[in-house]
Image (spheres, rainbow, N blue to C red):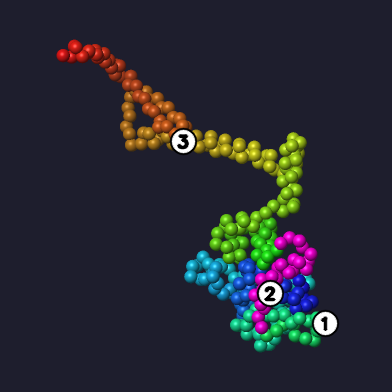
């Protein structure tokens, strides 16, 4: 990537559009027009690019959930050699004048400038859109030129965007507004453990093995386990107290009781409370024992 040649500039624009605007694969890049991206300034004078996406198969507009709640923006990074706004401005200068209408394709075919001196004197881009194969293999070609052995596809750019935002602890509710995902669970698919997180996890596990977990000042895993247990017990105790506190008023709601002694047994086993009342003013009742008759006697 970079701005030293037509190919490098096209690669830079493609990558910037992918990670800042959350574009998918090849088709969304292919469908982009020059008028879809506009240069604006904030009230403080900071420049940014705003992407007004067209309706696509995945974002048809028929369902309001298919439309992003925010318009993706790409802000300038002054002083950085890879400032995305500087790359966009250079691309605008190098485009043929006939290809600057709003309906013109955003990505243009590259003129092959074999001689170094041709970069400064010949047109960088043709009056034609970049080919599908060219756009579809940009990520793969960039990885090959960089000497990377890992397999990369165009989706790797979008994955890079999601991974970077997740690693920086941006809320998933904010990420999906930029990426265009429809549900929060989609964000978790891009969540992977980075090296620093693995180091912290490894040190935690090592401290368990050596019995020195409580000595780690920067880790709270050991205390948190006790705290959760303690909190659970407190919640349970509070819950039982509330049951005992509110059970009695509920039993005698709108009831009138006079005389005698009342014994109430309340348990926490999800069984109904039992109530026994003994009237001291009345003598205990007696019952006659029934005599069982045999079949012969009943005749």
Of 61 and 237, which appears nearest the observer? 61
Q: Is residue 39 visible?
A: no
In terms of secondary structure, where does tag 3 sit?
helix
Q: Mark 1–mark 3 contact, CB under 8 Å? A: no
Please state the extent of the stretch shown in magenta in the rendering: 128-151
Query: From what the image shows, is residue 8 above or below residue 255?
Result: below
Q: Which quadrant would residue 231 be assigned to in this image?
A: top right
Q: Is residue 166 magenta?
A: no
For the residue labelled by badge 2, is the local secondary structure a helix, a strand or a loop? helix
The quadrant of the image that shows the N terminus is bottom right
Name the residue beneath numbered marker 3.
Answer: 243
Please report whichever mark, 2 or 1, sits nearer to the chain's N-terminal start.
Answer: 1
Task: Kindly identify the residue that appears in the image at 61 percent across and 58 percent down.
Answer: 187
Q: How many dots with numbers? A: 3
Residue at the spot x=39%, y=28% of the render? 274
Mark 2, residue position: 134
């Amino acid at each position: 990537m970079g701005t030293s040649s037509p190919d490098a500039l096209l690669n830079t624009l493609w990558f910037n559009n992918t990670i800042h605007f959350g574009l998918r694969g090849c088709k969304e890049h292919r469908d982009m027009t020059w008028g879809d991206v506009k240069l604006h300034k904030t009230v403080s004078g900071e420049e940014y690019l705003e992407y007004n996406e067209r309706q696509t198969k995945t974002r048809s507009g028929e369902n309001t959930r298919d439309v992003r709640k925010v318009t993706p923006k790409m802000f300038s990074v002054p002083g950085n050699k890879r400032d995305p706004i500087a790359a966009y401005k250079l691309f605008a200068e190098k485009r043929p004048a006939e290809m600057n209408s709003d309906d013109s394709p955003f990505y243009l075919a590259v003129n092959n400038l074999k001689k170094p001196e041709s970069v400064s004197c010949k047109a960088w881009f043709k009056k034609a859109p970049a080919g599908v194969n060219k756009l579809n293999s940009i990520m793969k070609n960039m990885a090959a030129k960089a000497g990377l052995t890992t397999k990369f596809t165009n989706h790797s750019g979008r994955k890079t965007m999601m991974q970077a935002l997740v690693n920086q602890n941006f809320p998933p509710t904010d990420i999906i507004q930029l990426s265009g995902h429809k549900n929060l669970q989609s964000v978790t698919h891009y969540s992977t453990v980075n090296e620093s997180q693995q180091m912290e996890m490894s040190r935690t596990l090592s401290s368990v093995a050596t019995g020195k977990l409580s000595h780690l000042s920067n880790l709270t895993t050991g205390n948190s386990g006790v705290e959760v247990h303690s909190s659970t017990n407190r919640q349970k105790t509070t819950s039982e107290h509330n049951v005992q506190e509110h059970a009695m008023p509920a039993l005698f709601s709108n009831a009138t009781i006079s005389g005698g002694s009342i014994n109430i047994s309340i348990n926490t086993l999800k069984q109904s409370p039992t109530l026994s009342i003994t009237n001291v003013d009345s003598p205990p009742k007696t019952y006659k024992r029934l005599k069982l008759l045999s079949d012969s006697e009943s005749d």
